[in-house]
Amino acid sequence: MRLYYQSQLTEQKLQALCARSTVDDQATQRTARRIIAAVKREGDRAVRRFSLQFDGVQRSSFAVPPEEIRQAMRAVPPALKQAIRLAANNIRTFHRAQRPDTITVATAPGVVCRREARPIERVGIYIPGGSAPLVSTVLMLGIPARLAGCRQIILCTPPQKNGGVPSAILYAARCCGINQIFAVGGAQAIAALAYGTQTIPKVDKIFGPGNRYVTMAKLLVAADPTGAAIDLPAGPSEVLVIADGKANAAWVAADLLAQAEHSADARAILVCPDKQKVKKVMVELNRQLAILPRRQIAAAALKQSFVLITSNVEKAIAFANFYAPEHLALNIKNPRRWRALVKNAGAVFLGVFSPVTAGDYASGANHTLPTAGAAKAWGGVSLENFLKFITCQEITRPGLRALNKIIEPLTAAEELAGHQRAIQIRLSGL
């Protein structure tokens, strides 16, 4: 990991330090555009070609048949089944509490405005499954989709080398009530969900994290009026750990590696006001990395990551707000004291016993979070992401007459006589 001192960095250098080139580079965009165009034009034929090219798999059908799902129910070990059910319960409990109330307000006499939630009818869920099939993501997205009342939930996930889908993913999907599952991954899956193919239904909104190509494909289809909306830019994993002099170096190192092992594109950032603590963390990082099964992936991620030494915790949090990480871990004394200063982060983990791993799997909060600085404007996935809100207005005759005292001068100022006529034609007959 590279080492920097905040006091020695200009604002331009800080901006360069915070840049994530894994999402918006031109090569990634060109590849994603090519895949999307082909799937949009050829449908299943293009999806089958890209699945063979990128995954080395050619299934007779993308759809996972009921028998394969039934076999998965039997193949998942009892302990894992119980873990999935317990995690699902925590996730369901937290997301059920997010259900919004209907709002009815009389803004003026005879004028009533109402805001009501409606489920998005057709949603697509993308579950990464390349080097690490994310069973937990099935729960994080399937449960709120079901609670929201989405009529159709389509799940896409990359096939394994044998052409199948991991049994645990199929079991988790069944726990969420998802029956339409397709063994398709990558940008081709995003394109298929966005535009529909002969086999895969078109959806209204796409959810789920992924690599740079998946993330770029999501951004591209969201920009196309004929494509699909997306939840948020959820690309390669990021963690920023703020540690003070009292932090346990081994624990900090473990938190950094936990996210670094996701992919070579991941980012693991340490921000610390204590130089001696940084040295201890680096020793622990090397020791733990040497015994990590995915050490090659984690080592590649660490090469793109860095350590920043600040003068105090307050400046460390100020940098975190500038960086806007997906995960922010406050491994510091009295973390609640500093929580109010955090402005930009996908999820915040307070205190030494709140590792990011807990949020990744089982605490109940959603782990699908904005990356690459998108936390400055986006929040993580919640129940509301699967809903849309409709406003209703009901106005009485006296209410309309009173409103016209506001509307008439405004329509005149905007020179929109037709708007005023729609009011006047009603009032003239009263």
Image (tube, rainbow, N blue to C red):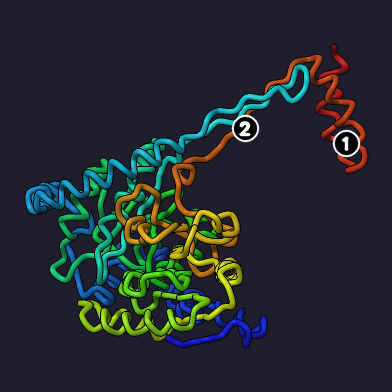
Q: Amino acid at mark 2?
A: Thr
The x, y position of residue 332, in whole percent, is 47, 65
Name the residue: 90% across, 26% down: 405
Q: Is residue 77 left or right of residue 239?
A: left
Q: What amino acid is labelled 1 in the image?
A: Ala
Vertical placement of 90 versus 193: above or below? above
**Snapshot quadrant of residue 397:** top right
Residue depicted at 55% across the width and 55% down the height: 337
Mark 2 Cα within 10 Å, few/some/many (few <14, many 20+)?
Answer: few
The residues tagged by marks 1 and 2 sit, at their Cα atoms, a distance apart of 25 Å
> In this image, 234 relative to 415: left or right?
left
Which label's residue is closer to the chain start, 1 or 2? 2
Tell me: residue 161, above or below residue 138. below
Q: Farthest top residue?
A: 430
**Residue 364: % across, % down:** 35, 47
361 shown above or below 238: above
Q: Quadrant of the N terminus?
A: bottom left
Pinpoint residue 245: horizontal percent, then vertical percent: 46, 73
Left or right: 226, with 356 as reference point: right
Q: Secondary structure at mark 1?
A: helix
* Residue located beneath label 1 in the image: 417
Instruction: Name the side, left or right, on which 74 lies relative to 49.
Output: left
Residue with the mark numbered 2: 391
Nearer the observer: mark 1 or 2; the answer is 2
Q: Residue at x 86, y 25 (%)?
A: 404
Res. 225 in view: no
Most distant residue in the front direction: 246
Q: Is residue 422 above or below residue 381?
A: above
SS at mark 2 in the image: strand
Quadrant containing the C terminus in the rendered view: top right
What residue is drawn where x is 32% and y is 61%?
A: 357
